[in-house]
Amino acid sequence: MTGTGSSTSALVAAAESAGADAIEAFGIVGNETRLAILLALWEAFDPYTEDNAVSFSELRARVDVRDPGQFNYHLRKLTGRFVNKTDRGYELHPAGLHLVQTVIAGTGIKKAVIDPIEIDAPCLRCDAPTAMSYQDGWLYYFCTECDGFVGGRTGQPEGILFSQALPPAALSNRTLEEVFVAGVSRMLQAFVMKMAGICPRCAGVVGSMFEICENHDPPSDGVCPTCRRQYEVAVKWTCSVCKYRGQAPPCVAAIIHPAVCAFYHDHGIDIGYTIDSFERSQQLLSLMGKHEQELVSIHPARVLITICYEGDELRLTFDEAMNVVESST
Ligand SMILES: [Zn+2]
Ligand SMILES: [Zn+2]
Ligand SMILES: [Zn+2]
């Protein structure tokens, strides 16, 4: 038990904002036999079967631990937290299922890399050819000539027009265009959750604030040398539980606001439900790229977003929580 004791001490030493429950959870799963039990229960799991219980003896056989006492010890450690005990045996607790799914999503395919490849769509800013790549769990869509909307950090491509965190599982059984569509859809879904104050990763409380560049001075076809963005204001979300973070220009995130959806709906464009093709995803990015935003007040921070389409105009003023505080058409 010396090993268990020292690893628990290391967890206590490492933890700052993580609470006692999180430390205990890390301690529970930090053992190969217990991870094997979770994996074996997931292998036996059928999402459309009501009873997924596996008997003690079958589970022990699946994990191949000969000593029943030792196996029982590890199984008891998981039970109640990651594993449920039922009348018929053992099954994954939702937390255990989520844990295994997270790992599986990260290893969905063997080589989770897409080298930069040109795709059939002109740049939203300069009409030059664009390309797409996937690396380190991020999907990048970028211009081959201009600075795009965001300057790339070290290891990222230059000229980013759109980027989205995407688990490697998103690359499985999809063409390049379909991966792109998955990225755009995921961005929209994450906006919906974040603007409702819900973390898209853990469902904890997400807060938002505007980050304002005080020396904003982008060239006409590039990004500001100070903030590396096209836009002066970015809305930044942070989860108070899991430290998830995300950011976007308010004029881009506004795409899923009901007033904006209704405006586009009146012009025959559905936002969200029908983002099911590469062309539709491109159209959506193109619409978002034409939204204009202006910082109209610093204290309190307010951003005016103007959307023009087919001669009509929608003007919405957002606060830092991305609530509309004023609107006009
Ligand atoms: Zn460009
Ligand atoms: Zn700037
Ligand atoms: Zn979270």
Image: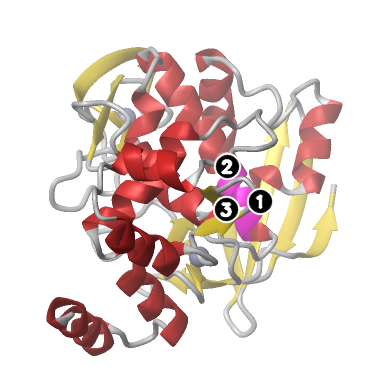
Residue ID at (34%, 63%): 74
Q: Please determine whether, in this image, residue 273 is positioned above or below residue 92.
A: above
Q: Position of residue 147 (x, y in %)?
A: 26, 40
Task: State the image coordinates of residue 27 (x, y, percent, origin top left).
Answer: 31, 73
Q: Please give the label number shown on residue 94.
A: 3
Residue 149: % across, % down: 37, 44
Q: Is residue 12 magenta?
A: no
Helix, strand or loop for disc 2: loop
Question: Residue, x 56% and y 30% (percent of image)?
Answer: 46
Task: Determine contact: label 3, label 2, CB under 8 Å.
Answer: no
Q: Amino acid at mark 1?
A: Asp
Query: Three-letter amino acid code at disc 3?
Result: Pro
**Residue named by callout 1:** 87
Q: Residue at horizontal 60%, vertical 58%? A: 194
In this orientation, does residue 165 appear? Answer: no
Considering depth in this image, is 47 or 184 the residue closer to the camera? 47
* Mark 2 and mark 1 residues within 8 Å of each other at the beta carbon: yes
Q: Majority secondary structure of the magenta segment?
A: helix
Q: Which mark is residue 53?
A: 2
Which numbered disc flags the more N-terminal residue, 3 or 1? 1
> Which region of the structure is painted magenta?
189-194
